[in-house]
Each structure stands twice: as structure tokens, then as C-alpha cells.
Image (tube, grey):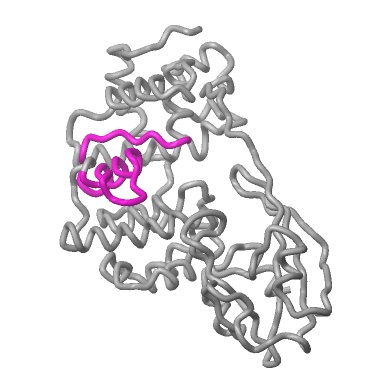
Amino acid sequence: MPKIQNSISPELQARFATDMMAWQTRHGRHHLPWQNTRDPYRVWLSEIMLQQTQVSTVLDYFPRFLQKFPDVSALAAASQDEVLGLWSGLGYYSRARNLHRCAMEVVDRFGGAFPQDPLDLQSLPGIGRSTAAAIAAFCFGQRAAILDGNVKRVLTRVLGYGADLSVSAHERVLWDLADQLLPTRSLSTAMPRYTQALMDLGATVCLPRKTDCAQCPVQSLCVARQQGDPLRYPVKTRKLKRTSEALWLLKVHNQQGDVWLEKRPGQGVWASLYCLPVFDSAEALIGSLPAGQELRHDPAFVHVLTHKDLHLHPVQAHQARVKSKPLRSGVEGAWMPRSQWQTLGLPAPIRKLLEA
């Protein structure tokens, strides 16, 4: 087991932040719409959207969100369905639910102004330590370290930190090391620049499966480069076990061509989204319909979630025999025309089925 490093050298402490900031000024990203702002609402919104989502995708959603909800008060005043509808297609919908709850708490607890203290920011729904640090650093010049996936990769390589990050104690040590590397002077301007430098280096140079060490501003300080094997970092051995689940989806129209959609429960797969009726088996689906109902079984397909494979079985009911009343008692749902369901928060595979 490698020795767990818990301090950094004076040379690294003296040079790392300075070299990173100089590189970001000349070679970093400056064109993204959430950059060059001290508005915590915009920074927070971008940070949440960018979690597990590519920049190219967020570039499409970010301006539409701002147009609909230009500030935190507008977002707090919206309904959850409005928020989920605009989020539809971004995935990881718990982010959208937390986004809405967070906006309401910012209004209720802090009078509509995001707090400056990272600990206060962390007390809000959906804001973890790294996101809180990003907001505090970018908007308020707070000396707070971010440690998202890209930054963990950069720092473990520079430091040669080989401890297993699946062990929480080892990750806490990396947080301490990240704190030691932070700028110490002119924080109002240094912290936004430094924080952006870490993000840019991890996104453009120090990549998961490829490194461009010749373009790295801290190559002379990097232990992993000196070792000749930067891709061995970071070390994380524990992996979440993938699971699978089979679901049957009922697509059914009334005589007017409206589709029946139900709102999913607040917990579980596709929580709080609108969806075709979901059943655990073909028998349960058939049992929900009138006897003798004509059905068409479309090809099954797999929808991949982060740690689960959903085996989806679409079934269409012949619309001539469909009742106009709700299909299942006790389940919130409604018949909806295309103009209505297009604006709802729908799981990606459900939207594809409806648009087919």
C-alpha cells in the first residue's frame, strides 16, 4: 500500500497556483456563457447542469433556462412540472428537483440572495462541498477548494497521490492537500482564475484516457509525469455494482388521439416525471386493460442509466377499444394531446416512443 501523502512541498505550494493562473489567462477557456460573471445564480445553475453532462449539451440548455427563469426568484416561483419540463433531455432528474428546492430555500432562508459562506451553501439542496466551493470562489473570492472528478484527476497526478479514493479517509486527505494548494493573495481575482484553471486543465489537457503533458503548465511539478505513467491516477478500486430491471410500457390513445400519461412517484426510477404507464410484467399490463384488448408488442430495447440497465418492453393498445376514463385508479395521470406532453418532463426513452 502506498504511503498516504498529507502535505505538499514548499516549491509546489509556491508555484502551483501561480503557474496554473498564468496558463489559464493565456490558454484557458473564456467563451463559455457562465464564465466572466460574479452572479451566483448563473454559476450555480451551470455547476448543477455540468454534473455528469458534457459542456456541448449544457450550452443548449443553459440559455433556455435563463430565458425562462432569469433569476432565483423566478425559478423558485415556478412549478416542479415547469422545471422538469425545461430540464427534459438533460437526464439525472434529481438535479432538477434539487435545483427547484434549492431556489425556494434561497428565497425563503436567505431572502433571494445566495449566501457567501461555503458551509451555508452546502446546507442547500443539491449543493455538495465542491459545488459550494465553486460558487464561493467564483462569485465571492472565497478561499475554498473544488474537488470534482476532473480536479481529482489533475491533483492526484500532480501529487502522485496513489491512495484509493474509494476510501473516504483518503479522499479527505486529498481535500486537505487541495486546500494547501489554494492561492493566498489577491483572492478576489486569484480564486476565480485558479478555480477555472483547474477545471480547464482537467477538461482539455489532463484527460482520463489521454494526457497532453507538453501543454501542461505544471508538467515540471507533476509526479505522475516523472514516473512516466500518469494514467495510473487517480486510484479508485470500489465500483458500484450494475443492476438491471425489466419494465413494460403501455402506449395507448383515446378516440381523440391523446396519449395517457401518468406521473411517477417521487422516489425511484424516473421520479416525478410523466411517463407511459409502467408495469413489472406483461401479465400486469394486460390485466389493466379490458378483456380481449388487441395489443401490439413492439421491439424491446435497453436504456442505460448510470448504474442500472432498463430492459423496456413497449406495448401498444388498439385505440378503438380504449376507454376515455383513466386507466388505473389511484394513479395520477391524464389524457394529453401532443401539444401538452411535448412541454412536460419526460424520460428520454418515453419521449422517443411518443415521437416515433
Give how far across and how far down residue 217 sits, in percent: 43, 27
Residue in front for this viewpoint, 143 or 343: 343
Q: Residue at x 27, y 63 (%)?
A: 104
Q: Residue at x 16, y 62 (%)?
A: 111
Q: Is residue 287 left or right of residue 75?
A: right
Question: Is 143 a magenta residue?
Answer: yes
Does residue 230 lie above or below 131 as drawn?
Answer: above
The answer to which image quadrant residue 339 occupies is bottom right
Q: Is residue 3 left or right of residue 211?
A: left
Q: Is residue 340 left or right of residue 33?
A: right
Q: Residue at x 21, y 45 (%)?
A: 120
Q: Quadrant of the C terminus?
A: bottom right
The answer to which image quadrant residue 8 occupies is top left
The answer to which image quadrant residue 77 occupies is bottom left
Question: Is 285 a magenta residue?
Answer: no
Number of marks in picture: 0
Give how far across and how far down residue 43 sits, in percent: 33, 53
Q: Residue at x 50, y 40 (%)?
A: 203
Q: Which residues are magenta?
A: 120-149
Does residue 253 lie above or below 42 as drawn?
Answer: below
Q: Is residue 326 left or right of residue 114?
A: right
Give how far across and how far down residue 131 sits, in percent: 34, 44
The residue sitting at the bottom extreme is 256
Does residue 83 lie above or below 217 as drawn?
Answer: below
